[in-house]
Structure formats: C-alpha cells, structure tokens
Amino acid sequence: MSLTVLMNAGPWLSVPPPGYGGIENVVATLVPELRRLGVRVVLASVETSTLPVDEKIWVFPDGQFHALQRPYNQVCGISQAHLHGVVRELHARDDIDLVHDHVEAVGLATMAAMGPDGPPVLHTLHWDLAKHPELYGNLDGGDRVRVNGVSASQLARAPQALQDHSVGHVHLSTPLAVGADRRPRVEKGDYLVILGRINPGKGQDLGARLAQQVGFPLVLAGPVGPYHRPEDLAAAGDEARQNPDVRFFYDQVAPHVDGDLVRWVGTVAGQERDDLVAGARASLFPLRWEEPGGTAVVESLSLGTPVVSTSRGCLPELIEHGRTGLLTTDEEELGELVLAAGLLDPDECRREAAARFTPAMMAERYVGLYERVRQLAARE
Ligand code: UDP
C-alpha cells in the first residue's frame, strides 16, 4: 500500500512515553503495525521521540509535559507553536495523503481551515468531550475532516458537530494482548492496584476509602499532575498546588495514604508496571468520569487481572460483567465486588485481550478508516 500518513502526537511527551502517556502510548502502539501494513509514517512529535518512523518533524527538543502546571495561556501557546510547525510542514509538501491527528480540538479546526489545499484529516477523540463543545471550533472542513472515537459510548456523548463528522470508533489496544492467552499464570498477591493519572475522574480517593473498607492493600500508580515521583512532588513545594490534580491529591487522596494500606508509588513503567498489575487481585477503576478509551483497562485484562469498576463510559464495552470483571452503577457496591473478584478466572481475561485488543487489530481498523476518510474527501 502506498500511503503516507502524518501522525500528530503533539508536544507533551516523547513517543513512546517514558512512563505515563495515554495518547503517546496509543501512537507508539499503532505506528509499528501501520508500517508493517505498508503505511509510510511521518511523526509530528518532539525531537526526543525514539519510535522508529519514516520521518520526524518537531518544534520542541523534548516533551513539554512539565509545562502543564503553567498558566493556561502559556499551555495554549505551546500547543499553538507545535501546531504551526505541523501546518507549515503541510503547506510545504504535497506527499501527505492523510493527517491522523491525536492532539487537540484547536488543531483540528486549524487543519479544517486549510480548506481544499490541506490533506484529509482523521482526528481521534481521546477525551470525554461532552461538557466541552467549545473546545472544538469551526469544523467546516467540508468532507475532508473526520473524527473517530475510542469507544461507542464516547462518540454517543460527543458534541453533535463531532458526531456529524464521525466515521465510527476503534477500541484501544496494547502490545501486551499479543499472545496474552499463551503466557503462564502469574501468582496473585492480595493487593489492589489503580493504574492511571491521579485525578478526580479516575477516583483514587474513592479507591483509597474502599481499600480501608475491605482491608486489602492498594497501590496507586501514576503521575500527580506533572510529577512522576513522590520526591519530585515533595520538592516542588506549595507552588505545585496551582495544578488541580495536585490539589486533589493533597486534599482528597493523601489523607488516606498511610504507608501500609494505601501507597502512592508515582509513575511505574515497563516490567515494573506489568508485574505490579499482573500480581494484583484486581485492577480498580472507581471512575467518576465517563472513561473514553481505557488503555489501562485492556492492559489489565492482558495481564490476567480482572477489573472492578463503576460502570461508566467505555467500561461495559471492554468488560464482560461476571467473566472479565465486575461492574456496578452503585459506588457503594464496589467493596463487595472487590471481595468477589478473587473468584474470576485470570485466563478468561487474557483470552479476551488476545481476541479483541491486539495492536494489529487496531491498525487494520485504522487503515480501513483512512481509506474511508480519503474516499469521503475525494467527493468534494
Ligand atoms: N501508565 C503507566 N504508568 C503509570 C500510570 C499509567 O505506564 O504509573 C500508563 C497506563 O499503563 C496506560 C496509560 O498510562 O497505558 C494511561 O492511559 P489510559 O487510557 O488508561 O488513561 P488516560 O490517562 O489516557 O485517561
């Protein structure tokens, strides 16, 4: 297949990400499979990205994640500088068949504004955008600009303008799903884990209270705002509190962190992350937001760890209640579900992951969508 795709992963983290990194992980998972299918990939990211691609473009030498605690206008300035680099590149060359954009609303509107001179664009929605229609400016790129969701529920909740431009959804995937059904069983510990950004939507405060209720140790893994390690957060002092996730951590989560029962270990990566999740009795997702895609959910299944979650967002699409996890609409029931999770079969989780969430499956779906987006654009 001769198709050149400009993959826009944004300026925040290198690809693959050093540890935490939702969008960057998706891009790092998708690109090798696309290249295996013959797609030429031009990656728009930061210079420190090490993902093998056919070409790289960047504005910033390294990831700007640390700047996310700065005032909002400065954060937008970073986004805009990155985006101008991408648009400049698009104006300068005519070999890009399609832009696969993962970054931001404003970016999509800007590309739409390129009009018929610009290539077709597929924008993957990564967030729960129901409450933020204003983030998406004018999408009048005619038939050139399309969006896809990472779950059916995310799309169903998206602002109407996005639904009008939708070409469907593609569930997230993980390299851990490849051969997951053939890996040997891992001995389970008696602890629970929450893998994800520390954030009110992810509900670590609820998880911590739950751990105290059922008496199982809980490990919280993930960054607090831009801080990946407990010592970095401690060193940042009061200024760090400008970040809402830092305030959430100090006000709602830290009071429950008591060393023995509930621990925050910062961001974990690589084998350490996989061992932590594989050895857990259950992965908790005490969600308060409508989880749009849930990479950590499919990773947990791949590692043979059942999921206990509030039934929000994409969770019912990814988890079969009673087989690969336990879901409830009632937060009060989570404690009982944690106790029951020990009865679920880890092999069922790993079989499900191998059958549904491999990168090859995701890439094939995307290649199908690229064709569809280009056909729709050609109608103009
Ligand atoms: N992650 C990680 N280390 C951590 C916490 C999270 O590597 O300590 C990874 C996690 O494995 C997943 C990603 O960060 O691949 C989070 O993606 P997800 O879709 O679950 O959540 P998001 O943050 O994008 O809402």
Image (cartoon, rainbow, N blue to C red):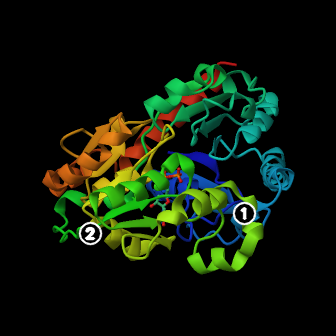
Q: Residue at x 73, y 35 (%)?
A: 135
Residue tagged 1 = 241
Q: Residue at x 69, y 64 (%)?
A: 65
Q: Quadrant for residue 56, please give it.
A: bottom right
Residue tagged 2 = 279
Image spot of residue 33 (x, y percent): 44, 54
Viewer-side residue, 39 vs 86: 86
Q: Residue at x 66, y 65 (%)?
A: 226
Measure the C-alpha gap from mark 2 to mark 1: 33 Å
Q: Quadrant for residue 329, please give it.
A: top left
Q: Earlier in the sequence, mark 2 or mark 1?
A: 1
Tell me the number on the disc at residue 372.
none
Label 1 beta carbon less than 8 Å to ligand 1: no
Image spot of residue 131 (x, y percent): 64, 30
Q: Is residue 341 left or right of residue 293?
A: left
Q: Amino acid at mark 2?
A: Gly
Point out the image quarter for the C terminus.
top right
Relative height, residue 24 to residue 319 (above, below):
below
Viewer-side residue, 26 vs 216: 216
Q: Amino acid at mark 1?
A: Arg
